[in-house]
Image (cartoon, coloured by chain):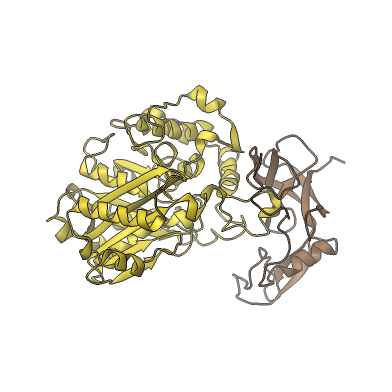
Chain colours: A brown, B yellow
Amino acid sequence: MAAATFSEVLPTGPAHDGNDQGFWDGLRAGALCLPRCAACGTWRTVGRPLCADCWSFDSTWEPVRAAGTVFSWARSQRQLMSELDVAVPYVSIVVALDDVPVRLLGLLVGTDQAPRIGDRVVGEIQRPANAEWPVLRWRPEVAA
Amino acid sequence: MSARSAFRAATAIVGAADIHLPRGTAPAGERALVLEAVLAACADAGISPREIDGFTSYAGGDISGPVLAADLGVHELRWSSMVWGGGGGGAAAAIGAAAAAVATGQAETVVAFRGMTQAETGRLGYAKYYFDNFYLPHGVATPAHVCALRTQRMLEHDGVPRSALRNLVLAAYAHAQNNPTAAAYGKPLDVAKYDASPFIVEPFHLFDCSRENDGAVAVIVTSAERARTLAHPPAYVLAAAQGAPGGYSALNENDTSYTSAGFAAGSSGQGVASRLWAGAGVRPDEVDVVQVYENFSGPAVASLIDHGLCPPGPAAGEFMTVENLTAPAGRLPVNTGGGNIADSFVNGMGLSVEAVRQVRGTSVNQVDGADTSLFIGGPMAPLVSSVLLGSDRTL
């Protein structure tokens, strides 16, 4: 599938406004870090300058366990972007984290099977060859 | 309710035009196409283009009110507004904005329009306008991906059956067989062909995805009083609503109601759909015909659920039958020109023209005695909108 009109570099790294800097710095340091309101303790989704509960601008970046369940998934069968170092088909998932009320988008790797909603997954930090910053990939949790 | 008495049927759509061509084939640019559509809508209404005094649109672009006003040589420009955010979700809101301008006396004759060509806009199916580095590294790069994620949960978690999506598509294809301008004209679709078609982004088959066209669409809104003096039966604007519930949209897939198309009520107890019904004084079961924006089939089904037109969960399957969705005699005929999937796609605005035809009684798939005609704008967008049109029998 020739769709070489896009950049071959995987789009990663902080936005110009820096509101998500701690997330990317965390991945580089080997941890999933998410923003939490310094005033009221509410977990935020990444990239927002303000707490929508108490309107404080102050937040801290706290490490969070990269484990959760599949909230939804979609399997791409046609290449709509060329930056991915994964050929179609690939499965994108929304992960509901175990420990904080935040969902993250991710790519499911290490399996050829489509997941089911509710399946347990664990995250691992990877540095794709075509990416400047690391990304979080997800694998099915192996039963202990 | 004073808001309702002020806005309900104060305005009407009096002219409508839909020009669409296969994508990449427009002989001139978007601006020329838009002007062509505006002139055609004026001719349809029987008014002079000089009388246009306002312009509204959505989803961005440089073809602004002052540009068009100068091109058309209007007497005076009084209104120029763009629905802010939401892409195709703002399609019906552009009509709502035009009606608001007229109803409040700030303009008299306002065009709501949208034009796009592949050469200038590119393909919306590949648009990356909304997607940042929390989406792109995970292969979530287009509206298809996000709508697929939301639709999969609607199917697997909420229990809406796959047949609901398929039957919406089959009904649209059935309608397109009577519409010579539809892309699917002469190309009927059946269950076997649908099921055998490849997945694009699972759960979406090829046939679940909208088309893309070069084209332009324009509808003209003026006062109800003036509308009664013009060429066609007025399509009164009974109500319009736009927005999104709190906890929905632009939250990196953290929306509270993830499988909603955005029209349902949030924590306020109100939403786009409930405000629409309250403003119109019409119940969902009183709607005669619906044009619902299908970027993809799944979000369109979610839109019908949000509006209370179709039950949620497994019961959606009992309602969403081809028989129920097909004109002239179905319980709720949907996308009677073929819609974005089987007719054409100019960012969904073509659906508004078919909604007007149903009120006038001129659709190729006319619903008998259609008095209330609903146009639902783009679903599962950060901002969504609906507009309900009515015949003079709804006044």
Q: Is residue B30 above or below residue B24?
A: below
Q: Position of residue B366 (x, y in %)?
A: 26, 35
- View extreme (right): residue: A144
- View extreme (front): residue: B27
**Residue at 68% across / 45% down in the picture?**
A92
Q: Is residue B223 left or right of residue A8?
A: left
Observer-nearest of B374 and B144: B144
Q: Quadrant of residue A33?
A: bottom right
- On the question of residue B265 being in view, the answer is no
Q: Is residue B110 left or right of residue A136?
A: left
Q: Count all numbered tags in the image, as a single digit.
A: 0
- On the question of residue B242 being in view, the answer is yes
- View extreme (top): residue: B192
Q: Quadrant of residue B200?
A: top right
Observer-nearest of B359 and B37: B37
Q: Quadrant of residue A70?
A: top right
Observer-nearest of B209 and B326: B209
Q: Position of residue B32 (x, y in %)?
A: 36, 56
Q: Position of residue A119 (x, y in %)?
A: 73, 41
Q: Is residue B207 left or right of residue B183?
A: right
Q: Is residue B327 left or right of residue B26?
A: left
Q: Position of residue B365 (x, y in %)?
A: 29, 34
Q: Is residue A35 above or below residue A58?
A: above
Quarter of the figure that contains the N terminus of chain B = bottom left
